[in-house]
Amino acid sequence: MFYANLFIYKYINAIIDSKGDIMVRKVAVLTSGGDAPGMNAAVRAVIRAGLYNGIEMYVVYDGFKGLYEGDIHQVNKDFTQDIINRGGTILRSSRFPEFKNPEIVEKAKQRLSDFDIDALVGIGGDGTFRGLNDLSKVGVKVVGIPASIDNDVSSTDFTIGFMTALNTICDCVDKIKDTSTSHQKCSVIEVMGRHCGDLAVYSSIAEAAELTVTEDHPYDEAHIMKKLRRLKSQQKGHAIVVVSENLLDVRELAKKIQAETGFDTNVEILGHLQRGGAPCAYDRILASTMGSESIHAILNDNTGVVTCLRQSKITTMKIEEALALPRDTHEASLALINELQ
Ligand code: F6P
C-alpha cells in the first residue's frame, strides 16, 4: 500500500512542481536529537532533491548547536554517496536544551541569513520540531522530517528509524530466546522508547512475548506472577517479558519473578544498540520519500510544516498542529496483545 502510494505521490508532485514559482536558492539540512537509522537516507534525499531542483545545498553539523555556532557548509552530490545504508547520522547530532532561549534562536536565524539560506530542513523527533517551530515563529522557513526510533511523533504513522530499531530488537530477542529455551529461563527485556510504548508493543507482537509492560499496558505484578507460575507449572520452555524503559527497575522485577515463580530469570537491557545499524529498506524508502517531500514543500512555499506518513500517504502538517496532537496510544495493537498473550 505504502509503495503503491509512493507512485501516486510522485505523479502528484510532478504536477505541483510545474506550477511552483517560489524562488528558493539555498537550503540547509540538519539532524538533531537522538540519532535514528535512516537519518542519512533522509539527508541524502533532501540534498539530492534540492540539487535536482537547482537549489544550492548546505549541511549543518551537530544539530541546533552547530546552527547556533555557524557550523554550516555547502555540499554537492558527492557528499551523498554511499550514505543511504549507513546507520547514525553523518551530520552528527546533539541535544541542545539551550535552544529554548530566544536569544539563541535569534542567533541561529542570523547564522542562516549570513549564508543567505532561504529555508532549513530539520530531521529529528518532537524536540527537533519544537526547535524548528521556534525558528518558524521568528520568520525562518522550516520543514521538519520525523526521525526517531521511539515512534513518538503523533503526526506520522511511523517515524524514520522505528522499523529498523524494531527489527534490531526482534533479532536480539530471537537470540535471547534460543538460549533461554535451552535453559528454561525467563528473560526480562527492557527496550527503549522514552515514554512511548511502541517498540515494546510491536516487538511483543512480533516475538510472541508472554508479557508486556508499557505506560498504556501498565505493570500488574499479581498478573505477571500468576501467569509465569502457570507457565512454569505447564513446563513452558521459556518466557519473555518485554518492558518499556523508564517505568520500573527491571532488575528488581527479575528478582521477584525468580523468587515467586520458580523461573530462573535473566535481565537484558538492550540500550543504545537499538539506535545503531544499517536502516532497513522500509526506513530508507520512508526517508527518501520524506526528504524529497521536504524540498517540494519549500518550493511550494509550504513551510512551517512537518512531513508525515498518514494512512500510507506522504503529506505535510503545520508544525504547531503536529505538536498539539494527543499521543497515539495504539489501542488496536494493545488489544491485539491482550488477545494473543
Ligand atoms: O529518543 C531516542 C532515545 O533512544 C530514547 O529511546 C531514549 O530514552 C533516549 O533516546 C536516550 O537518550 P540518550 O542517548 O541521550 O541517553
Image: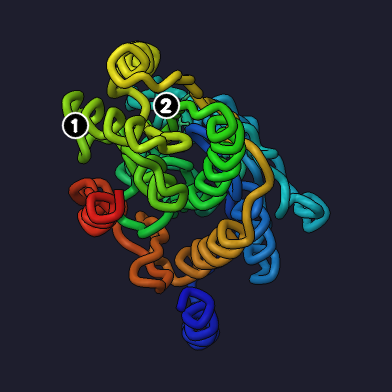
Label 1 sits on residue: 223
Report the front residue among 315 and 149.
149
Kindly state the secondary structure of the residue where label 2 is placed: strand
Q: Position of residue 26 (x, y in %)?
A: 61, 55
Q: Amino acid at mark 1?
A: His
Among the two numbered marks 1 and 2 on one chain, the one whose residue lies closer to the N terminus: 2
- Which residue is nearer to you in this view: 175 or 214? 175
Which mark identifies residue 188? 2
Horizontal relation, residue 178 to residue 242: left or right: right
* Image height of 231 relative to 96, above or below: below
Instruction: Name the quadrant containing residue 178.
Output: top right
Q: CA distance from mark 1 to mark 2?
A: 15 Å
Q: Residues within 10 Å of mark 1 (few under 14, many from 20)?
A: few
Residue drawn at point x = 51 percent, y = 36 percent: 32
Q: Residue type at mark 2: give it.
A: Val
Q: Nearer the viewer, residue 223 or 291?
A: 223
Residue 145 place in picture, x, y as percent: 46, 53
Left-right relation of 139 to 238: left
Picture residue at 43% right of the left edge, 46% below the top: 203
Residue 324, percent across and down?
Answer: 20, 48
Q: Residue at x 64, y 54 (%)?
A: 41
Residue in the foreground of this view, choosing between 180 and 12: 180
Q: Position of residue 56 (x, y in %)?
A: 68, 57
